Image: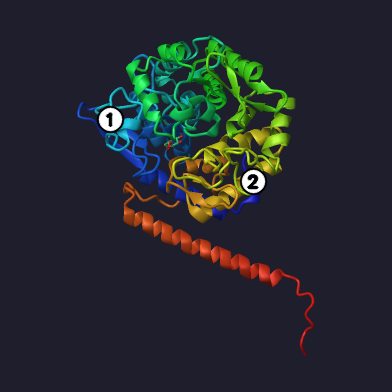
Amino acid sequence: MSLGAAIDPARVARLRAEAHRVLAGNWRAGALADGTQYGFTCPSPPRYRHQWYWDSCFHAIVWRHFQPARAREELRTLIRGGRLDGFIPHTIFWHDRAGWRRAPFYATHSVRGSRATAHIQTPLLALAWESVAAASPEDPGFRTEALDALRLHYEWLDGHRDPDRDGLISIIHPDESGLDDSPKYDAVFGWMSHYLPGYVWLVERSRRLRYDSRAIIARYEEHVEDVLVNVFYALALYALARLTGDEQYARRAARTEQALLAHCWDEESGLFWDLAGRSHAPQRVSTWSSLAPLALPSLPDEIAGRLIEEHLLNPRRYRAPYAIPSVALDEPSFRAGWHLFRCWRGPAWMNTVWLLAPALRRFGYDAAADRILGSCVELVERHGFREYYNPLTGEGLAARRFGWSTLIVDLLPAAQFPPRAPDSAPFEGSMRDELMAMGAEAASEARRRLRGRRRRSRDRPRTGSTPRV
Ligand code: GLC
């Protein structure tokens, strides 16, 4: 269900056209020297030029509204970047090798020359595949063409990432969830956290064990059964069950759901916690990941009610003027706009709203979902598709023309008007473009504030002054 009548169709049409333009500008296609073809959307050039696993899934989910052929190509390319044993990397460097400054920080087998990272990202591929297949009546074979590869992928995850066989898969680096520097990992990774220089050692140590995750999990304590990763894992397994008709995946998904309830749910706080290390120590830091189980199909109403009433809609916790903050407002680590190196420590991201707003509707909170979505429309109208936003002021932060922020399109009604044709030239993101975008944004913010001030002074009751005659 979507925002419905509450939003002017002309605004939706403009937003969709702009989203299409962003995806089209970030589209990269070509072939490697050996003839391997690729086509994917880079998250935001020049900062993010490669193919990222979960970004690609989100991009494909939006592409299917505009050009389903591109959605299919994006997902096929992701599978093509994987290995024959079912492993699919977190990042794939198709046309552009990792830059020298960033290369040491990528979880690759060697600092130079790797084509992709050797670690994973939140595995929602089967979920994205299913939704793209549903939007592909002109290519009915798409639904089944990659079932072997998808099965292998989820077998790899099961075989390599769940050594204690409790139904929850583990991550061995904080960025494997996609939530890189979330404060929920601070106590686990300590001086090797994603935003600290020690992260280089975490990478190096995994390299020395050849990224054999079973060996890494057996030798070290720094690994996490992550709630968000496992929610998406369960959703993807359900999607795989529907795609293949094979009931064993539905049973595995249900097992992961049950494990989240049995091991991660904390009755006292009313939240789900990640579990760290061999002892499964709960990490009691409230981030949006603690609310992610709202998206699970069989979450008991009582638990959903607590997540929503005590947390998601509580003004002291997650109810912010704009979108949904990545960390609870009352967490000591919450930083609304601190974004130079740390991005998941408070700012609001669009994929959070994409996961949680439909869940709010499912539990009957339509008005709250509409409010959140309405605030996201305003964010995009004011600042464009930014990487994330300050949930208190609405300021747009970090990368511009950020691919997955277009996910808002998936939550809005389809526009009545055909979208404007997107610019087809790839957007490279030069310094000049950046400065022009910053100038235009500052001017429109200044206009907005001025209009607000005028409106306020017009509406202010004139008390205490006697009208002159
Ligand atoms: C940042 C995000 C990560 C994303 C990547 C590419 O590192 O934390 O989730 O996949 O950028 O957009």
Give the quarter of the image for residue 298: top right
Crowding at dot 2, Cα within 10 Å, few <14 / some 14-19 / many 20+, comes out as many
What is the quadrant of the C terminus in the image? bottom right
Marker disc for residue 265: none
Task: State left or right for residue 6 relative to residue 120.
Answer: right
Q: Residue furthest toward the left?
A: 33
Marker disc for residue 37: 1
What is the quadrant of the N terminus in the image? top right
Residue of label 2: 320
Q: Are marks 1 and 2 in contact (CB under 8 Å)?
A: no
Which of label 1 and label 2 is nearer to you? 2
Task: State left or right for residue 169 relative to residue 142.
Answer: right
Give the quarter of the image for residue 403: top left
Q: Residue 436's spot in the image, x, y percent?
A: 38, 59
Q: Residue 428's spot in the image, x, y percent?
A: 32, 47
Element carrying mark 2: loop
User: Is 411 drawn above or below residue 228 in the view shown?
Assistant: below
Of the pair 330 and 375, the residue shown nearer to us: 330
Q: Quadrant of ligand 1?
A: top left
Task: State left or right for residue 118 relative to residue 459.
Answer: left
User: Is 259 drawn above or below residue 348 in the view shown?
Assistant: above
User: Is 96 drawn above or below residue 420 in the view shown?
Assistant: above
User: Looking at numbered disc 1 in the image, what kind of residue is underneath it?
Assistant: Gln
